[in-house]
Amino acid sequence: MISSILMIVRRSLRLHRLSSTITVISIALSAGLAMAVFSISAQSSRAFGGGKGGWDAVMGAPGSDTQLVLNTIYHLQTSPGNIPWSMYQELLHGEELSKFVKLAVPYAVGDNHKGYRIVGTTPELFTEFEYTTGKKYELVPNQVFDPLKGEAIIGATVARELGMQRGDKFKPMHGVIESSAAEIHDILYVVISVMKPTNTPADKVIWIPIEGIFRMPGHEFGAKGAKKEAGLGVEVPDEFKEVSAVMIKTTSPFAGFGLQSLVNREYPGVKVAWPVASTMAKLIKDLGWVNKVLEAVAYMVVVVAGCSLLASLYNTMNERRREFAILRALGARKQTVFAVIVAEATTIAFLGALLGFGVYFGILAIAAEAVQSMTGVVLDLWLVHPSLYWTPLGMLVVGALAGLLPAFKAYSTDVAGNLTR
Amino acid sequence: MGLLELRNVKKIYRTPEGELQTVLDLESFHLDAGEQVGLAGTSGSGKTTFLNVVAGILRADEGEVIFDGEDLALMSEGGRDLVRAQSMGYVFQTFNLLDGYSALENVILGMVFGPGADREYAQTLLEELGLGHRLHHRPSQMSIGQQQRVAVARALANRPKLVLADEPTGNLDPTHAAEALALLRDGCRKQGAALLLVSHDQDVLSGFERVESFTEINRAGRAAGGAS
């Protein structure tokens, strides 16, 4: 009996191929969209929520923790302000603070090259820091810049997108975004190594020695009225030096809490955002309503697809009354005719869900490209998110439900009346 | 041996105006296994309703419809469907072939709800009816005469005990009508199936040894002209 039902379904799909194809496409679009929304949402939350390893805390100017983390971890937005170089020294050597700190690396931002941020830092970023547990940045060739030379290390995305390689030279532009009106600093940097891809925001950064920032013509340092202008061969005294932030690995989770409490209470003009992961998690949570709206849209799209399937099938029921009457006259039971229509609706939903995987990969590929170029975070096309099996299964259920009303109409066909039509 | 026995069978419809109208009122009718009977009747005399009651498509409101020892009037709709699928074939005036299916598939449809699909047998039937070269053609790609031969093959596909034929030559020219009728009668004979054929065409009925006047046996038709 199942084989005869399948034969009837196959013939019906062939006979109504145009409306069936359109319905399959509409279901594929909705299934693909739903899978993409859930998968991207989950992957983004995980990527921005922080993984194992990386920095524990960030010290920066007072302001929002989110802005501080976005600016230093994700290299997005502008810096909330600068903090004195002395605070970095305090973290390294100060009696009160150094006991909390396992590693401290300063960041100085404010320049770019063709839209890619330039970040001044110290060699420890490459020699000591593990961006994920047990993994340091790998350089090709394995050469870290000399702190006192005009040398640069470029991220993998920068190298790929700008076609840059070891030996290339560039002049930094003032500002974190490219602008035709921005000042070009009159100093030449040479690329000495390229980072291997890390699939993190670090891939889209150009790293130079922080001393280079302090000696770059056009930069000005100092606060409270006293200013010192940087220049080639000019050494800015430590009391004028400023950094955008200091990235911190703490000695323990308790140390992070202690450091944050102490700094935020006792050191005016600076703050510590800790823990970094929960700062982003809070942001994701605050933006959770966006996800909810997207998910609601995805659900609605699925319902609309189900309705279009119902309408498409229901519209053919009148012209198919004679077909059902003939099948009944040949001995098909009412339940068989009912099952034929439900099976037809489920088959259309199945084909749509199958094609939906193509739509899903298409959307994810485009989204992954956009997210990577904006944030450096890489979405995994091959990650098996639960939505990849729940959505197709859900589609089958929606398809079967959409088939119920037309199936009932077919079930109720007046056999004798329609045989003589 | 009696294959079909009808006693005091009535079929009553409700008209759009709400009145009850008896379209079938039959005191008795019988048909032996393998017998071929022609039923003569004018249009609107209730012949199609009679065939639909015998086929179990309609349930008799009163009386007994004994087919192969079982009373169809007492059976559920599903039970009657099963009897029809396993033991009856039906040839219609308008053929009632399904357009989306090939000739072969149409014949297979005559089996799937009863004994099950037997592709080889379906093909043999079509070849015996001279349609071996049209197996994969759809009804719309065939002549009227060829379509009726496919309908005959479908009616014989489940190796029925009884074939019902409702004006099977009504849409055919005389040459094709005679040919289709001969194929139908021969096919029934070969399979040992009884044939109950209704027609208003005396040329068609003249070949039958037993011809009944439906107007005579249907008291409702005599009284009110009936309904088809």
Image: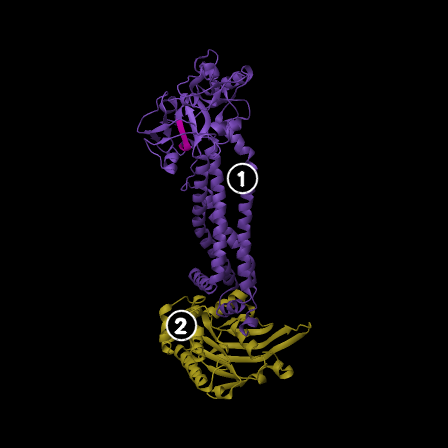
Chain colours: A purple, B yellow
Residue at the image position 48 percent from the left and 59 percent from the top: A20
Compare residues A167 and B225 and report the one nearer the observer.
Answer: A167
**Mark 2: secondary structure:** loop
Q: Is residue A10 left or right of residue B223?
A: left
Give x and y (percent) for residue A402. Answer: 54, 55
**Left or right placement of residue A285 versus residue A73 in this view:** right
Label 1 or label 2, whichever lies nearer to me, is: 1
Say which of B26 and A111 sits in front: A111
Residue A153 image offset from top left, x and y in percent? 36, 28
Q: Which mark is residue A303?
A: none
Mark sitting on residue A291? 1
Q: Chain of mark 2?
A: B
What secondary structure is the stretch in magenta mostly built from?
A: strand
Amino acid type at mark 1:
Asn
Residue A204 drawn above or below residue A320: above
- Magenta-colored span: A203-207
Q: CA distance from mark 1 to mark 2?
A: 54 Å
Q: Amino acid at mark 2?
A: His
Looking at the rendering, in which quadrant would you find the C terminus of chain A? bottom right
Q: Is residue A407 magenta?
A: no
From the viewer's side, name the closer residue of A70 and A324.
A70
Circle 2 sits on which residue?
B137
Q: Position of residue B127 (x, y in %)?
A: 36, 76
Q: Is residue A206 magenta?
A: yes
